[in-house]
Image (cartoon, grey):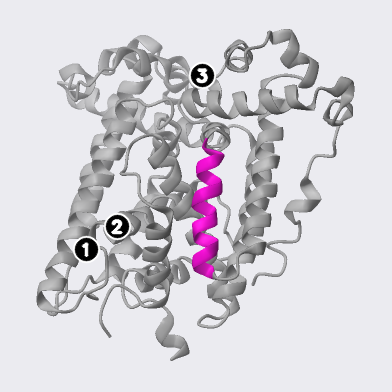
Amino acid sequence: MTETASGRDYSWTPGDGRAPSSRRGHRTRERILEAAVAVFEERGLVDVTVQEIGQRAGVSSGTVYKYFRDKADIFRFLLIELRRTIAEETTIALDDDGKLIARPAVSRFLELYRDNVALYRVWWESLDPPTEFSDIWVEVHEGYRRGFAAALRRGKRTGVTRPDVDVELAAELAVLLFERPMYSRIVLRWDLETEDSQVTEVTAALLGSGFGSVAG
Amino acid sequence: MSTGTCAVRWDDVQISPTASDAPNRDGTRSTRQALLAAGLATFAQAGYDGARVADISAEAGMTTGALYGHFDGKEALFTELFRLYGDEITHALHDADSLEGQLVQVIEVSRRFRGALRASAGILQRRPDHAAVRRVLRETCAGLLAWHLREPLTQRDARLVARTLIDVLDQYTLMESMGWIKRRDPSDVASALHSMVMQGLYVK
């Protein structure tokens, strides 16, 4: 991660505006992105080279540099897309009472995480030492935290959120449910014997009515 | 099911003491302790890759030669710190008499060992040997938490919830030590998490 860590490069213009002008250029860039995802999934970002990504895509390093400044630039491009997808597709709706409808969002999130395991792998790898990518991580975390807090606060007004819930703290913990447990499960592949459906149920319960009622 | 997932216990993977682990060799146990403390502080400050042997020695006010007299190098020192963390957290979880008490312990011990945890997070993906040790520790901790979850939950769900709680608090203390989230009282965090498990966020 040295390239980005030292540079503190906050530019969010992917590929420096070097968007392909031709259909063939588009295909080449797509091929490079696909190759990068494959390489990232196997080896992360730190140890891979642009040359390796080029080889996997069947193009020269020079061709890769036509579209991307460096390997971090490729990841940046992919991360922007991922971030947009998460924002669009994992919104947690509220029911008529104002309670979070967590189950479908958790289920979709698990799917997205699995589809983008390479990017999550690299994203986690890029958290320390802090880089522009850890800044994005914190930003996304903070966005979700605010969202959860707003939903819980609204629930307090309408009387559905338990009065003793510390809204800010519960919101923080709610976001964390979507971070490390998913990393353990999908990137590190630690809990292969549990089903996604089980994870969805448990996560939704922690974001809903808890487990106390099972015991009565 | 939980059988098989935790076939290896934390105690079984502990690295057996090497010659240089023996206390009081040349009466230098305190030197060793000082080096470990310096390692924790340096890893907390700089992460695994950012911490050089020279930095750790300097933090302890010693020469690199003194460090190499006690540890084969940075990796050996880290391994020892992680082992100490594992010992401390498993004992604390064993001794705590409630789930909420255990959650407080996870935060407090993790805070104390935040250097070891930051270093661990930094090498987790590229060091399968460390990932394996970390995973066994997580299973052992989850097993200890699951004991207090057996009342409301099935064994299968208790194990999963316990792992989730360990993971959440791991991430919490890591983000806290990076200065990314607000630092809070461990008992407040434990109480909020405990109530999410038992009562939930919503009025029934």
Q: Which circle, 2 or 3, is nearer the viewer?
A: 2
Question: Which picture quadrant has residue B68?
Answer: top right
Residue A185 showing in the rendered view:
no
Horizontal relation, residue A136 to residue A60: left or right:
left
Amino acid type, mark 1: Ile
Foreground of the two, B106 or B142: B106
Q: Which circle, 1 or 3, is nearer the viewer?
A: 3
Query: Residues in magenta?
Result: B99-114
Q: How many residues crowd mark 1 within 10 Å: few (<14), some (14–19), many (20+)? A: some
Residue annotated with mark 2:
A169
Question: Which picture quadrant has residue A191?
Answer: bottom right
- Whether B101 is among the magenta residues is yes
- Chain at numbered mark 1: A
A71 w.r.t. A118: above or below: above
Q: Which mark is residue B50?
A: 3
- Chain at numbered mark 2: A
Amino acid type, mark 2: Leu
Residue annotated with mark 1:
A92
Foreground of the two, B47 or B45: B45
Residues under numbered marks 1 and 3 in contact, where contact means CB atoms less than 8 Å apart: no
Q: Residue at x 64, y 72 (%)?
A: B1
Q: Position of residue B201 (x, y in %)?
A: 29, 72
